[in-house]
Image (cartoon, coloured by chain):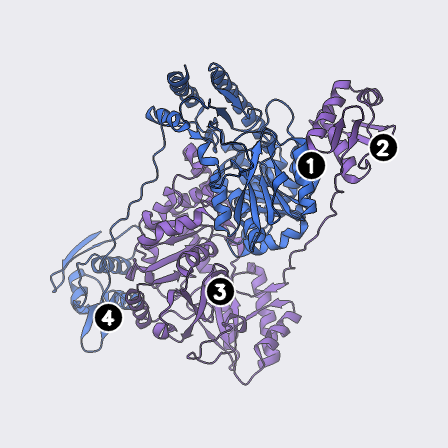
Chain colours: A purple, B blue
């Protein structure tokens, strides 16, 4: 139904009812739009309800109800003796357009997996099973900020079995991912004067998170044996490390360094944050068990569902030393409150029914093939070598010191539509003086492309490298 | 399969394979457990691989593989000439038990809805439709931190239609709920010297959030017309208000106050944060449209799915003045990164297929019946009166100044297993001197109990009131 009319003030007003909308609602909407759009200006006087009702073929009560409503909302002013006038309301703002960054044609940057691998049907089955059997209270605010008991129980079992973590449900806290886990820990451990030792090179985003949360990063050198804790200063309250597959060098932390790190944490009564980045994705032999089990009272184990399932789930977990559980929950309560529960229930079901293990095996097999193709391609260039190939979703391709600059390689690839990442962005600004000089290298991720897109991305990479090193 | 054996060091080791576990994994697990449990002590020497292999009926390669693995993990030390010994590893921590608070037998506190009303089947249908039609990229990290475009488009339409909000998808940011929305705004607007004017009385948790985020709450007086902005000091950078149904008094903000608030925001170039608490749940007449539409460049509209669907979803949204979009996203990026996407896709589907409107109508009808029962029960006591009854999931029962103290009523109810909330906890510690004296009252929520539990809770409430006011 469309009705068109002219008020005595000369304004054309279209009352075009939406499905299910009553006459009064339609009139109110038309008046609001006219006021916000500027067709009815501030101070303008509206026709008497009797006049307007007659023009529109509506009851007078409908019109006066609409006027009352808009007076209550502040669009109209009703004054005794002077009728109903339009209040001062700003014009509707024009659209403010922000475009997200365009995706590159080929993407061999690290940090993301192949999202076509997400097991949609299996996840939907878990969601259905979980929600139809969940108690009503599961849909309310959580009784326990740590997260759903079903998921914490499933994770305690899974992490013990698959990663050798010393986990009990009581010391597990569910978060929205490693980002939130690290931020909560930095707020708890980094407030005051405690610095955070963070691997150099490492992910710059993580240093940003720590700094924004009020802690100061300190560059922890990484060499062929992994992170080197020997020169840690006294005021470091936590060490953040990726022992299973160091990001970005790919080194697995050496047993002597594992011991040194644990000994430091014990003697300094400090905390090691074990980012179990890629821990479940080791290809050529059995995974190295979690560092956390060596000293569960000094190591925080942090993991996520981003690699095995999807980053979009926003589900992560921490296994905490008991003394940190309450301080971390206090921070969680004052930043987001509990983590989303329905995904937690579905993940608990997926783990308990072994779908999570199946998914990890499938992703591991897929990535191992990709890794083999990539390492094979690099092996054709005698000037280059691959490192950190035993696990994860990226390798480090080291570039010869006397060849082209890292940025030249990345630019040459970008011109062909291939996005690459280099080591350069991963170094701390204050590179540790006691560390080795900064090396040149490409951090090549093999997770992002689709199965067919991967081979095309590799072909472009080989072409670019042939141009520069062939 | 269970194997029992004694090592030459006199330790009983049980190798009990889990389903799907290989012999070597089982042996490794048994060794780890024995070391962590203290049955194999630091310094103890393990039998030679040849000896152990014979005892266990395993190949020597299996045993030496397990030893190597545990050396890599730091449980064992291998030294040339002295064989394999147990490293120093702390004993497994005992369970650290924290019990969540017990639920009361009857609960008439505000803040939560009846979780039996969650539309499980309809939600599952939306999840299925959304996930089977989602592009693969939806499972990865978000291209746009504001949230899924499907949900922002659905919300822009819905909020315009149902709440009169001037919304475009570009200025909507999805968060994990009002908690995160308020924290992000307090970090953006409250850093430096800006104070946050917050209604007095109001929810103490929200004051805590603002204070923790670095802004200082200022008590904004509330009277019969709602929040009173007339005495706002110069250093206030934002006003936080619940205009549709003030929490906890239940007042709907008067048109004159709406205008005064907007005029203040414009002249001070400051921001009003409109917490549209209960905006969709008005019973006796049409909802009052959102304040935001009066000044979309000065008002943040904040809503959530907690009331209509479930708090456990952790989905909220803000419609922001354009200049705040980037600062809010910068804070979001450094606290949790984007909000969980799969729930966003499902909610977008539920809104687009009108399931969300149906759910709101169903919840509104259910709560209106409950409200009527509660108001009817209170009307039997001439000393008491009900206020703020036109919307939401709670009313304010004002208590006579010369009667029992608020805390006496709450204690009497608690003794009967009924949890109630009073006005007392809602006042700011620094109550505004220009405000009316603190009143006594009960903030009675009717959302939490089940349908059958609600009548029982009411019966207990009536009994308690009869004792004190009968």
- Find residue A207 and name its label: 3
Q: Given this view, does label 2 or label 1 mark the residue nearer the observer?
A: 1
Residue at disc 1, secondary structure: helix
Q: Given this view, does label 4 or label 3 mark the residue nearer the observer?
A: 3
For the residue pair A408 and A147, the one nearer the viewer reads as A147
Res. A226 image quadrant: bottom left
Query: As displayed, is residue A414 above or below residue B309?
Result: below
Task: Give the letter of the chain under mark 2.
Answer: A
- B199 to the left or right of B102: right
In 3D space, how far apart are the residues under numbered discs 4 and 1 (Cα atoms)? 76 Å
User: Badge 4, how many Cα within 10 Å: few under 14, some, many 20+?
Assistant: many
| Label 4–label 3 contact, CB within 8 A | no
- Please give the residue where the numbered disc 1 appears in the rendered image: B259
- Please give the residue where the numbered disc 4 appears in the rendered image: B77
In 3D space, how far apart are the residues under numbered discs 1 and 3 (Cα atoms)? 45 Å
- Please give the residue where the numbered disc 2 appears in the rendered image: A12
Res. B363 image quadrant: top right
- Find residue A65 and name its label: none
User: Badge 3, how many Cα within 10 Å: few under 14, some, many 20+?
Assistant: many
């Amino acid at each position: 139904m469309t009705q068109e009319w002219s008020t005595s003030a000369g304004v054309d007003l279209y009352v075009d009812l939406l499905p299910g909308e009553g006459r009064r609602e339609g009139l109110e909407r038309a008046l609001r739009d006219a006021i916000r759009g500027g067709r009815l200006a501030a101070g303008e006087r509206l026709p008497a309800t009797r006049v307007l009702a007659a023009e529109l073929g509506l009851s007078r009560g409908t019109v006066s109800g609409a006027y009352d409503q808009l007076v209550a909302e502040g669009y109209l002013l009703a004054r005794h003796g002077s009728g109903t006038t339009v209040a001062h309301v700003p014009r509707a703002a024009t659209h403010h357009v922000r475009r997200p960054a365009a995706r590159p044609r080929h993407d061999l940057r690290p940090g993301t997996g192949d999202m076509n691998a997400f097991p949609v049907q299996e996840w939907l089955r878990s969601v259905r099973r979980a929600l139809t059997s969940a108690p009503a209270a599961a849909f309310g605010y959580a009784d326990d900020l740590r997260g759903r008991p079903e998921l914490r129980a499933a994770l305690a079992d899974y992490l013990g079995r698959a990663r050798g973590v010393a986990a009990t449900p009581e010391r597990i806290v569910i978060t929205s991912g490693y980002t939130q886990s690290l931020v909560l820990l930095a707020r708890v451990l980094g407030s005051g004067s405690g610095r955070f030792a963070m691997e150099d090179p490492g992910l710059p985003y993580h240093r940003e998170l720590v700094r924004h949360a009020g802690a100061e990063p300190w560059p922890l050198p990484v060499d062929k044996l992994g992170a080197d804790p020997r020169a840690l200063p006294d005021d470091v309250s936590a060490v953040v490390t990726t022992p299973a597959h160091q990001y970005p060098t790919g080194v697995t932390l050496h047993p002597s360094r594992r011991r040194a790190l644990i000994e430091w944490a014990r003697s300094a009564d400090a905390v090691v944050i074990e980012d179990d980045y890629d821990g479940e994705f080791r290809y050529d032999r059995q995974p190295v068990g979690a560092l956390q089990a060596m000293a569960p009272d000094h190591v925080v184990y942090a993991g996520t569902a981003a690699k095995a399932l999807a980053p979009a789930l926003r589900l992560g977990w921490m296994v905490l030393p008991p003394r940190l559980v309450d301080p971390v929950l206090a921070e969680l309560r004052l930043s987001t409150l509990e983590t989303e529960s329905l995904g937690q229930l579905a993940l608990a079901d997926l783990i308990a029914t072994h779908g999570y293990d199946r998914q990890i095996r499938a992703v591991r097999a897929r990535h191992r093939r990709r890794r083999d193709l990539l390492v094979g391609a690099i092996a054709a260039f005698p000037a280059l070598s691959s490192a950190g190939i035993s696990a994860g979703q990226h390798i480090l391709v080291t570039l010869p010191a006397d060849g082209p600059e890292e940025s030249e390689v990345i630019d040459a690839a970008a011109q062909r539509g291939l996005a690459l990442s280099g080591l350069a962005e991963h170094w701390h600004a204050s590179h540790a003086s006691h560390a080795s000089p900064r090396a040149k290298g490409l951090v090549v991720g093999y997770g992002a492309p689709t199965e067919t897109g991967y081979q095309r991305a590799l072909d472009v990479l080989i072409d670019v490298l042939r141009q520069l090193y062939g």
